[in-house]
Amino acid sequence: MTKFSIILEEYGLLILSGVGVTLLLSILGTIFGLILALVLGSVLSLEISPFDNRFQKNIKQVSKSLINIYTTIFRGTPMIVQAIIFYYSFLKIGINWSPIVAGLFTVTINTTAYLTEVIRGAIKSITKDQTEAGLSVGLSQFKTFIYIVLPQALKNAMASIGNELVVNIKDTSVLSVIMIIDVYNACMMAAGKYYFYIESMLIAAGIYLFLTMFFTIILRYIEKKIGAPLKQLTSSN
């Protein structure tokens, strides 16, 4: 038997389970992160109007400052460090959450930080003519944003959102540090038993390559179908 067949025979089911964990964390983390980013990115895109009273101006300024601090911190620190801090800090205060939940939380807040800037840029890319058109047909400012501006912004940001999903598929490997058995950790367990490190990592690399290529093809197909711009908006990722 070859080294590859030995690994797959004994650890094949564990590796397959690890694929499911990797997809769960990356897909749900991207979806939840996008939902939060839509809120934070929308707040960042708010402009201070001459008609705003002092309270409204202060709320907008404080909100933007807090969001900018949040995105700076989470885009400027590694996910592996964030995972360790959150997982063990919550355990220390008596919250016994599972590594999977902790990992999903980490991926979500990390994704939110990156996509917030993407959404902000996408909203800013929509011309004021669109807003004026909505207002001219009797829509309120809020409804104009929800029904006209935001859908177009999401369409423009589709390439960057898809890229974030692909990045998350690879980056979730660092969550093995909090004992999550994903693709990487499953292959490392096989490597540790037989010392087949090269072969085990080649299997892991092949799986990650397949997953990223598969989702890239799917996402590009979706982008073409909806006519989304293929150019990614800057997210500093």
Image (tube, rainbow, N blue to C red):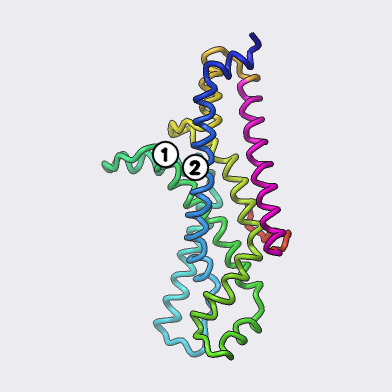
Q: Is residue 190 left or right of residue 101?
A: right
Taking the view exactly as shown, the residue that stands out farthest to the top is 1
Q: Is residue 132 left or right of residue 231?
A: left
Secondary structure of the residue carrying tag 1 is helix
Secondary structure of the residue carrying tag 2 is helix
Q: Dominant secondary structure of the magenta stretch?
A: helix
Seen at 58% across and 19% down, the residue is 8
Q: Earlier in the sequence, mark 1 or mark 2?
A: 2
Question: Given the image, on which type of amino acid does mark 1 rest?
Answer: Ile
Q: 103 above or below 132?
A: above
Which quadrant of the figure contains the N terminus? top right
Q: Which residues are magenta?
A: 200-227
Q: Position of residue 202 (x, y in %)?
A: 66, 25
Question: Given the image, on which type of amino acid does mark 2 rest?
Answer: Leu
Q: Is residue 213 left or right of residue 27?
A: right
Q: In which quadrant of the rendered view does residue 206 lie?
A: top right
Q: 110 above or below 98?
A: below
Q: Are marks 1 and 2 in contact (CB under 8 Å)?
A: yes
Reply yes or no: does residue 117 show up in magenta: no
Taking the view exactly as shown, the residue that stands out farthest to the front is 225
Closest to the observer: 228 or 237? 228
The answer for how far apart the CA atoms under marks 1 and 2 are is: 9 Å
Seen at 68% across and 58% down, the residue is 223
Circle 2 residue: 24
Select label 1 or label 2 by which is in front. Answer: 2
Q: Position of residue 36 (x, y in %)?
A: 47, 60
Circle 1 residue: 100
Q: Residues within 10 Å of mark 1 (few under 14, many from 20)?
A: some
Closest to the observer: 173 or 132? 132
